[in-house]
Image: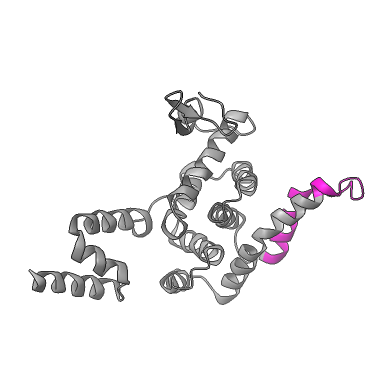
Amino acid sequence: MTDDLRDRLEALKSARGFLLPHHGAMAAGDPALHEAYLAMYRALTVEERALTPFAREAVWLALLVVAREVIGTHHIELFLAHGGTGEQAEALIAMAGFSVGFDALSLAGEGWNRQLPALDPGAAYARGLTALNGGQIGAETAELAMLCAQAGRGDQAAVRHHLAASYALGIPEPQMLEALSYVMWPVGVNRFVEACETWHHLLQSGEVTPSARFRVWAEMSGMGAYDPASGAAVGDFGETS
């Protein structure tokens, strides 16, 4: 039985080229969980979905920066393997680092609007990203990378900004979803849930026009955390629906 476990882990290490500690723990203590974990990992991060391999790794690079996940070196290798350059990586790293600029500009726009009436925080943030990009990354890929980065940070105002910008660029919704879904791995499912809640609210606001499939989701009510008092979902403002 222990030989089977050792063979399983060695085979996984050989296939991946490396093995992280949690694989050993799950394989030894809960093989069924390990199988489910591997299936989820393959579906989420390995199998080709809506994004091109280059765009996928560009999104991952920005996410690794905000998650401070230095351990994700294989994504850097994949970015380069799929045609990425050092200059493009530098641009993505700089843009991801500027994700906090959204907070700073929003603060200034709210608190200093009388002294700086011409300041448009969203527009200033977008100009900053464009300057840092320097034309290295295509507009759609850059938008998706920053959408993921801001979702990884949990900044819902910034997530809304990038979702709206993605719709303005005509980015297909499955690509937005794929970019957002990656946050589940390094920063947790809750960040993905929060970003999807922000997306749902944006769709319901009428500010963007969803596709037919996403309109079905937009028209659904009753989403939110469970309220034991009412037995229903609770919205952001404590209202049951």
The magenta stretch spans residue 191: no
- Residue 18 makes an appearance in the image: yes
Rendered location of residue 30, percent (x, y): 20, 59
Report the number of discs. Answer: 0
Residue sitting at x 50%, y 50%: 191
From the viewer's perspective, tell me whether residue 167 is left or right of residue 20.
right
| Residue 128 lies in the magenta-colored region | yes
Q: Residue at x 47, y 69 (%)?
A: 79
Residue numbers of the magenta segment: 109-132
Q: Quadrant of residue 86?
A: bottom right
Residue 141 is left or right of residue 7, and the answer is right
Instruction: State the image coordinates of residue 64 (x, y, percent, origin top left).
Output: 51, 65
- Judge from the rendering whether residue 237 lies leftward or rightward of residue 188; answer left or right: right
Q: Is residue 222 above or below residue 198?
A: above
Q: As rendered, which of 227 and 147 lies closer to the eye?
A: 227
Q: Position of residue 125 (x, y in %)?
A: 73, 55
> Is there any visible trace of residue 134 in the rendered image?
no
Magenta span: chief secondary structure = helix
